[in-house]
Image (tube, rainbow, N blue to C red):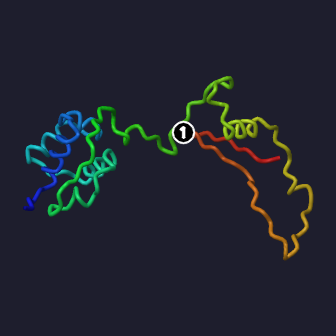
Amino acid sequence: MFTKMNLSAKIELLIQSKKLSASQFADTLGIPRSSISHILSGRNKPSLDVVQKILIAFPEIPAEELLDDKRNLSISAPAPKTAPSPIASTPSLFDAVIPSAPESPENNLAEQTIVQSNLRRPRESSPKATQPVAAPAPTTHLAKKIERVLIFYTDGTFSESKPL
């Protein structure tokens, strides 16, 4: 027989199946513990933000099952998660990278080496300004080339690199 289950009840079932306390669950999602307490007691309904964080922290939970009152929640093998949420630890593309010493093994990456060597090259005058360039033949296909690379830092400064 089908039993209708609201979102708060599904969250409670999820917490139990993952063998977490309400506090551990809140910490995993990166939300205040009181928020989970209020959801479980029925005082508040889960916000969209909480639902999104659940779906990110537990990708094995289908969104349709979590949100649809008419569907049961199928939960795969319990995997307790006591570490902080991946939401809080996932770096943004724009997070600052802390530079390390040149001798560090972190600098052995090919891309970093190329970028660092390009940044250290002395700048030359642009050949475009000093030499006339002939128009390409209409049948030739020109490959795209990098004109310059700009790197912006959080302190408002930037560096520019141009290929030789």
Q: Is 106 on the left-hand or right-hand side of 50?
A: right
Q: Is 141 on the left-hand or right-hand side of 40?
A: right
Front one among 57 and 35: 57
The part of the image, by quadrant, that contains residue 5 is bottom left
Residue 4 is situated, as x and y percent measured from the top left of the image, at 9, 60
Instruction: Specify the amino acid type for callout 1.
Output: Thr
Q: Secondary structure at mark 1?
A: loop
Q: Is 130 on the left-hand or right-hand side of 82?
A: right
Residue 14 is situated, as x and y percent measured from the top left of the image, at 20, 45
Marker count (numbered):
1
Residue at image position (22%, 56%) is 66
Q: 35 above or below 74? A: above
Q: What residue is pinned by disc 1?
A: 154
Looking at this view, name the residue that lies furthest to the bottom. Answer: 138
Residue at image position (75%, 61%) is 144
Position of the N terminus, as image quadrant, is bottom left
Residue 133 is situated, as x and y percent measured from the top left of the image, at 90, 63
Residue at image position (55%, 35%) is 97
Residue 89 is situated, as x and y percent measured from the top left of the image, at 41, 37
Badge 1, how many Cα within 10 Å: few under 14, some, many 20+?
few
Residue at image position (33%, 49%) is 59
Front one among 92 and 77: 77
Front one among 159 and 96: 96
Q: 97 above or below 94? A: above
